[in-house]
Amino acid sequence: MSHTGPDDGDAEVEVPIDPDLAPSDQAEPSRVHRPTGRRSGRAQPGVLAAIAFGGALGAPARYEITRLIHVAKGSFPWSTFWINVTGSLVLGFLLILMIERFPPSRYLRPFFATGFLGAYTTFSTYMVDTDTLVKDGHVAIGVTYLLASALAGLFAVWIGIIAGRLAAGGGYRPQPKLDARQ
């Protein structure tokens, strides 16, 4: 799949596209994507089972890490921080690897991305930890945790994307800035 970037004239720029998605918005970089015909308004039992099975493995993995990393009340929530950062890293790595290296699969991404990593990472605990720290008077720790988690998660997913591209054999290539006016 490719897309012509705004500053590239007629040059074709390769943008990774999830082959299971077919957005109707013509401004999306994947506008050249052709639907696979598998999309329907109803949930697909096999995909739901893949998500459930992944979640059934991801939640206990998160629980075990919280048991390994003990956090004192009122201190920086290191267990949730590391769970979310490692989940972001793995998500960036796996999605790029699956999109760029492996043939489309109906179950692989829902199992890993939505199921396992969705249950492994925890935005709700991140917010509850932040709220609890602030309400208990640990405002500096709460704000530091809020910002550090977001920045570290973004950095980790970026590193995961680069690592996924390297593992897929494509090497690192910066993505173009897409113009929403197209």
Image (tube, rainbow, N blue to C red):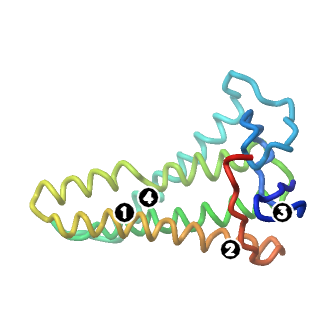
Q: Secondary structure at mark 3?
A: strand
Identify the residue under disc 3.
13
Marks 3 and 4, how far apart at CA:
38 Å
Q: Which mark is residue 62?
A: 4
Query: Of residues 26 and 58, which is closer to you in this image?
Result: 26
Tell me the mark number nearer the camera, choosing from 4 and 2: 2
Sequence-first tag of 1 and 4: 4
The alpha-carbon separation of the residues under discs 2 and 1 comes to: 24 Å
Point out which mark residue 162 bears. Answer: 2
Give residue 34's position: percent from left, percent from top. 88, 38
Please determine whether, in this image, residue 168 is positioned above or below residue 24.
below
Q: Of residues 42 and 176, which is closer to you in this image?
A: 176
The Cα atoms of the two marked residues, 2 and 3, are separated by: 17 Å
Residue indicated by mark 1? 80
The residue shown at (34%, 66%) is: 147
Real-space CA distance between mark 4 and mark 2, rounded to the nearest whole angstrom = 25 Å
Mark 1 or mark 4, whichever is nearer to me: 1
